[in-house]
Image (cartoon, rainbow, N blue to C red):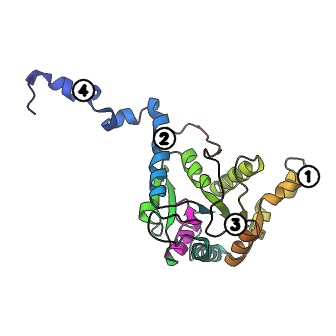
Amino acid sequence: MTDPHPQTAAQLASPSYRLAALDQDFLLSEALRGVRFQLEYEKVESALKAWGVRSTIVVFGSARVGVDGQGRHAHWYDEARKFGKLASERGGAIKGEVGQPRDNVIATGGGPGIMQAANQGAFEAGAPSIGFNITLPHEQFPNPWSTPELTFQFHYFAMRKMHLAMRANALVVFPGGFGTLDELFEILTLRQTGKAPEIPIVLFDRSYWEGVINFDVLIEHGMVKPDDMRLFSYADDAEAVWEALLAAGLKPHESIDKPALPHTKVRANREA
């Protein structure tokens, strides 16, 4: 349409005249942080529902572990890949067409290392898998094995953690550093306080975890109860992980009943 008033160029060029939904400066403003939280939630939720993802098995672990890594790195990578494959084959992720309900779909943080290994195993089984990636100051890319339509990018750690937790039927934690510890204790706290369903939690490589965390000291000083040690178990190979999950109540091809509104801890922090 021809502008009936040629002298309105300044008005048309003003940011205030942009459609709100197309105004990136407005959408990225401090005032719209709550809306951005909602957008990150809804975009992922819609995609997972469209694919019929009813439940997941979440695999955490270090991004620094490589297939040809030093020390036990290569072993950890190989076992994470094996677990992603066997859990996908036995758990219900390979089921019907896109959109039909499927359970125990492998879900990771979407990056390299252990995350890549678990996604790779699912791919080798012919199953879909999820990658919940996060933007970081140092450029990060998704690994090549997660299903493209189920590979997401988050700005907010809080929303990423919510999506990792809310469909989880089980949690498997391979060796890792600060990020892995953060994610492990997030879920342990939710379980300890009754804010999350009673999902199985398995720590891979007992010697690693007992060397990193002295749970007995926490008990000795009264920081946790001895019964809290029942929140998790250990396993030292992929097959043992699967057996531990079954022993702790995982039901292949089924989803654990979860509350309509997931009770996850959402940290506001200072994420812009």
Identity of the amino acid at label 4?
Ser
Residue on which the image places disc 1: 220
**Distance of label 2 from label 1 (alpha carbons):** 42 Å
SS for tag 4? loop
State which tag comes first along the sequence, 4 or 1.
4
* Residue 268 coordinates in the image, percent (x, y): 58, 37
94, above or below 256, in the image:
below
Inter-mark Cα distance, 4 to 1 = 65 Å
For residue 250, the mark is: 3
User: Viewer-nearest of labels 2 and 4?
Assistant: 2
**Which contiguous range is marked in magenta?**
101-123
The amino acid sitting under disc 1 is Glu
From mark 2 to mark 4, how far is it between C-alphas?
27 Å
How far is disc 3 from disc 1 in space, using C-alphas? Answer: 31 Å
| Image spot of residue 235 (x, y percent) | 74, 72
In the picture of the structure, the residue carrying the numbered disc 4 is: 14
- As drawn, the label of residue 38 is 2
Q: Residue at x 62, y 46 (%)?
A: 262
Q: Position of residue 201 (x, y in %)?
A: 72, 62
**Residue at position x 21%, y 29% in the image:** 13
- Is 47 covered by the magenta stretch? no
Q: Which of pointers 4 and 3 lies earlier in the amino acid sequence?
A: 4
Comes first in the chain, label 2 or label 1: 2
Residue 135 seen in the figure: no
**Cβ–Cβ below 8 Å for labels 2 and 1?**
no
Above or below, comparing residue 164 to residue 113 in the picture: above
**Contact (CB < 8 A) between labels 4 and 3?**
no
Q: Earlier in the sequence, mark 2 or mark 4?
A: 4
Q: Quadrant of residue 10?
A: top left
Looking at the rendered structure, the kind of residue marked 2 is Gln
Q: CA distance from mark 3 to mark 2?
A: 31 Å
Q: Earlier in the sequence, mark 3 or mark 1?
A: 1
